[in-house]
Amino acid sequence: MNYGLSLSVRMEKKIQILEREGYTDRQGVSLEDQVLDIILREIYLENGEKWKPWASNAKSLRVGEIILIIDSDTIVPEAISIGILLVIADTECSTGLLP
């Protein structure tokens, strides 16, 4: 999990920089996938080219502002679960994911 979160944080920083500079998707390759390739190469060089990291599907590595981890034995009070659903719905509406 730490590996995925580390990749996500590095990707978000790089994506913000590139978006400010006007970079977009190119030739059918999403900006996220371009950035993931850059980040994986940077990590490989940082560890002295000893361990080659791997990851794919860059869009699935992006993490939102809220991370909710619920295990199979976690009991979530109803009031909290309703509040979480409202936050998710509000987030999806404001980002255009829901009509």
Image (cartoon, helix red, strand yellow):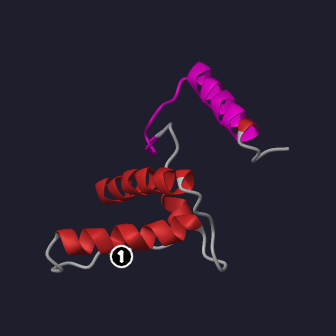
Q: Is residue 76 left or right of residue 95?
A: left
Instruction: Identify the magenta region.
Output: 69-93
Quick one: quadrant of the N terminus?
A: bottom left
Instruction: Name the amino acid type tagged 1.
Output: Trp
The residue positioned 54% from the left and 50% from the top of the image is 20
Residue shown at 53% from the left, 64% from the top? 32
Compared with 42, 74 (above or below) is above
**Residue 45 location (% of width, % of height):** 22, 74
Farthest residue to the right: give it: 99
Rendered image quadrant of residue 4: bottom left
Residue 82 position (above or below residue 93): above
Residue at 44% across, 42% down? 69
Q: Secondary structure at mark 1?
A: loop
Q: Which residue is mark 1?
A: 54
Instruction: Determine whether, in the image, residue 28 is placed left or right of residue 80.
Output: right
Report if residue 27 lies within the magenta region. no
Residue 76 drawn at (x, y percent): 52, 29
Mark 1 is surrounded, within 10 Å at the Cα level, by few (under 14), some (14 to 19) or many (20 or more) other residues, namely: few
Q: Main secondary structure of the magenta part?
A: helix
**Residue that appears at 50% across and 38% down:** 65
User: Residue 53 lies in what quarter of the image?
Assistant: bottom left
Which image quadrant for residue 8?
bottom left
Q: Is residue 18 shown left or right of residue 25?
A: left
Q: Nearer the viewer, residue 24 or 90?
A: 24
View extreme (front): residue: 21
Residue 18 coordinates in the image, percent (x, y): 50, 58
Q: Answer left or right for 16 relative to 43.
A: right
Q: Nearer the viewer, residue 19 or 98?
A: 19
- The quadrant of the picture occupied by the C terminus is top right
Q: Is residue 39 above or below residue 80?
A: below
28 and 85: which is toward the camera? 28
